[in-house]
Amino acid sequence: MTFRLHNTLTRSLEPVPTPESGPLLLYTCGPTVHGRAHIGNLRTFVAEDCLRRHLESKGQAVRHVMNITDVDDKILAKARDAGSSLAAFTAPFVEAFHGDLARLNVRPAHAYPRATAYIEPMIELVRRLQGRGVTYAVDGSVYFRVDAFPAYGRLAGLDVAGLRAGGSGRVDADEYEVKEHVRDFVLWKAAHPQDVASWPSPYGRGRPGWHLECSTIAMAELAETIDLHCGGVDLIFPHHENEIAQSEAATGRPFVRHWLHTEHLQVAGAKMAKSLGNLVTLSELEAQGADPLTVRFYLLTGAHYRKKLHFRAQDLAGAQEALGRLAGFWRRCAAIAQAGGPAQGQAADDPLGGLAATARQRFEQALDDDLDVPGGIAAAFDLVRDGNRLLDRGEAGPAGAAAAAAALAAVDDILACIRPTADQQLDDGPLTPTARELIDRREAARRRGDYAAADRLRVELRALGIALEDQPQGTRWRRVG
Ligand code: AMP
Ligand code: ZN
């Protein structure tokens, strides 16, 4: 494939791996559902969506799995404090997460397996590792012995001997003081008497370690060797390093062919993080008047995915203006193309046709070069500026306009926000909050496969005079009598 991506494992640009048969297997680490996802998390999920869309736009079939971490120490503690069962505590956050993704026009993964639905296969993986002699048990918890896996540290580029516990901070949540070595990590964690949930196992009641969850789900839902595995840079160590150790120690095969990590969204110089209390959620931005598609555009174009993006709320106004320019040009061209007329000729003879072809090619080349969205979008803006000039001077006709609209449609296969913004500009007035909420709830129902609920919500919306159309780029609405 002409598409080259940075591989964290080799620290170099490499062609995206192509599967020998079947779809490309893509695993993306999903959210930990003890609160609303913040726009930092969403930056990662939107970047992963861009990756998937670019692969699919090139004709590469993809099977995409994203786990939902619905058990860990923090979730258990918060559920206990709330006096809730684990399932009741996490359900609204899972639903809100799907709503966020839908409003950001993220293509749904083919499966969203929850950790709590995979306890048996996780225990099975611990058993397998036990059989390989790489584990030890202390007081009902089972640990992975890092010394038993010589390749440990390769992904993160770490000197194993010098490793300290800490990493992303998440490691602490999974640690007990009884490990033989500080870098060993827990596979199965003994239950605490106050835990609101625990599961029986050969080692006693407990719960799986966070890393074990992703290894198990990726292997169960995809394969023992997967093509692409993604997450934010905070997951490189220890999470992904530990996933590799467990999976490869169990199977004796490479776990992942290509690792992709996205840089963080920052606020005032610090990573946006649940633990730092500097969160901004998509709903908060919407309450301040931001359109989710503008947020998507901002997250994708604000910086290359391997660069930090420094969030400032005022930058959304610039993003809205820029997206509006793209959408306005798209509408202008679509209208001219549709009107046709005597000037209709070949796109090749129309100067706008030439500009459109160049923009399209530059955009694809930029995306092929490690998903360079900012570089690609610059090509689209050149088309808008020069194309508007040609149209203003009457130097371009319907064929050129059609080619320009088609070029923007190709850009929007990946950006997935220009055309819906242009359509929204055409909608006759904003949605009422009730209609907006019903549309979001229906989208969430559709994503979790609850088609009966989705159909009921469609009927409710129809009664409000809103008709829905499900399209590959998401659900669109229009007013009906
Ligand atoms: P979590 O819900 O904490 O498990 O994180 C879900 C995803 O969001 C993971 O891929 C993280 O690496 C990613 N993530 C967390 N914080 C940020 C941030 N500030 N910017 C970008 N991605 C993030
Ligand atoms: Zn994971």
Image: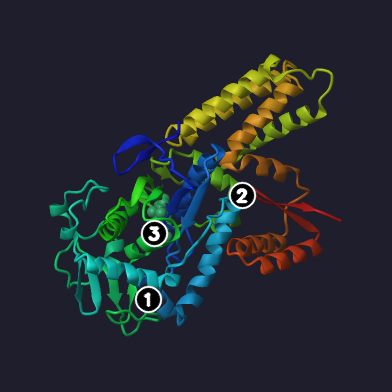
In the picture, the disc for residue 291 is 2
Q: Which residue is mark 3?
A: 219
Q: Residue at 30% of width from left, 52% of height from top?
A: 253
What's the distance in space between the residues labelled 3 and 2, CA to CA? 37 Å
Q: Please state, as top left, top right, bottom left or bottom right, where the C terminus lies in the image.
A: bottom right
On screen, residue 51 versus residue 321, left or right, reads left
Q: Quadrant of the rendered structure where residue 391 is?
A: top right
Packing grade of label 2 (10 A; few <14, some 14-19, many >=20) is some
Q: Which residue is mark 1?
A: 77
Residue 220, compared with residue 52, is above or below; it is below
Q: How far from the left and from the top, in percent, is residue 194?
A: 34, 84
- Ligand 2 resides in the quarter of the picture at bottom left
What's the distance in space between the residues labelled 3 and 1, CA to CA? 29 Å
Q: How far from the left and from the top, in percent, is residue 278?
A: 41, 57
On screen, residue 430 versus residue 151, left or right, reads right
Q: How far from the left and from the top, in percent, is residue 145?
A: 19, 64
Q: Quadrant of the rendered structure where residue 204 is?
A: bottom left
Packing grade of label 3 (10 A; few <14, some 14-19, many >=20) is some
The amino acid type found where label 1 is placed reads Ala
Nearest to the observer: residue 265 or residue 9:
9
User: Which numbered disc, 3 or 1, marks the residue that appears first in the sequence?
Assistant: 1
What's the distance in space between the residues labelled 1 and 2, CA to CA? 34 Å
User: Which numbered disc, 3 or 2, marks the residue that appears first in the sequence?
Assistant: 3
Residue 267 seen from this side? no
Q: Residue at 78% of width from left, 48% of height from top?
A: 428
Q: Secondary structure at mark 3?
A: helix
